[in-house]
Image (spheres, helix red, strand yellow):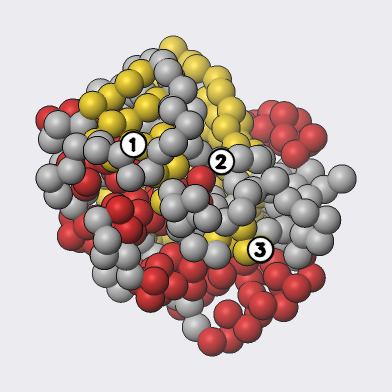
Amino acid sequence: MTSSVRVAGGGLSGLATALLLARAGRSVEVWDRRLGGGGRFHDGWQVIENGTGEEDALDELAALGFAGFEAIPAARAVFLDGLGGRHEVASERPYAYFIRRGAGTGCIDATLRRQALAAGVTLHEGRPAPERVDVVATGPRQADGVAREVVFTSDLPDTIAVLFDPVVTPTGYAYLFCLGGHATFGVAQVRRVAALREGAREAWRRFRAAFGEFAVRDEREGGQFMNFFLPRSLRDADGRWHAGEAAGVQDFLYGLGNRLALRSAGLAADGVLGRFDPERLRRTVLRPMRQTVALRFAYERLGRRGFARFCRAAAAGDFRELLLRVQRPRALGLAAAAAAMAAWRERRGCRHGALCAWCRRSER
């Protein structure tokens, strides 16, 4: 262990880990290969899920030590299905919170960066990390899921819309979020990504048909990828702690990994401080992730009619309560996950690294 705690990666999980360590009185240095922060994001809308447990996500994150960032509660949405259906979805309590990711003012990355610097963290920008570090938070190692996004400003009223059509976005979905005139359109998939561009064009046409010819200004197009594997631990054989997607921490169903990433940052910081709780890792990270494997297995087998039924069910009652029933880890879901993992297991070796205990077979 060096005199300062060295963190490789200045994204969400790296900055969050550094912030907690600095608040605990440790000297912390962070290396970020990019200048200005923000990682691979372009100030677009991303999601903190709020439908896997009764505790509100913002209350949980505040208890972990993360607060002061802008988060917009979401209690309504429009779901479009592949049969032409439009479904109005609502919940009494927020089913999610919307945050912006990137280096811009108001983005959670910029907020954590500012808080970390105020707590005394030393940030080295535009430089690779040294060979010996204590925390690895360098993001995904390989593309297990891919998204294309356009961030723009618009006169579209506040809108949260998702298209579920396996013909347009096989193994994925398309989304249009506009809040306060700031908009993000994207398509995400985990398989058959060669069709992503064509799917994005058709999804955009569907949203235009549903919401009219709204303005599109100052657009910035980009892409991103995510990885997913179930880790054996958050600590490797060399004693380094891992956080975020460097540890495989990701939701495998929809790719909504921000809440899990911040949980992993808390666990990694505790590990550096000598108070790591393996049971907390199992309960708050590994069990929820295994549940998403089972849900992903079912998701990829729904056809257009199956998604239409899901959208109708989401609109028929409280959407957050439906998410809680489906996503909360239970014995049946974990048993289904074990069967899915056996069917999907990568048996030729993976590129995720030594922490990987399970990952899905790659397309070859």
Please tell me which of labels 3 and 1 falls first in the chain.
1
Query: Which residue extends farthest top?
Result: 218
Other-residue count near label 1 (Cα within 10 Å), few / some / many at <14 / 14–19 / ≥20? many
Toward which corner of the image does residue 231 lie, by quadrant? bottom right
Please tell me which of labels 3 and 2 falls first in the chain.
2
Quarter holding the C terminus? top right
Q: Mark 1 or mark 2, which is nearer to you?
A: 1
Residue 103 locus on image (x, y percent): 34, 23
Residue 153 locus on image (x, y percent): 39, 20
Q: Report which residue position mark 2 lands on.
A: 140
Q: Which of the labelled discs sits on residue 164, or is there none?
A: none
Q: Report which residue position mark 1 lands on.
A: 6
38 vs 145: above or below: above
With 216 as the anchor, is 252 left or right in this view?
Answer: right
Q: Report which residue position mark 3 lands on.
A: 358
How far apart are the alpha carbons under marks 1 and 2?
Answer: 19 Å
Other-residue count near label 3 (Cα within 10 Å), few / some / many at <14 / 14–19 / ≥20? many
Residue type, numbered disc 1 = Arg
With 123 as the anchor, is 253 left or right in this view?
Answer: right
Residue type, numbered disc 3 = Trp
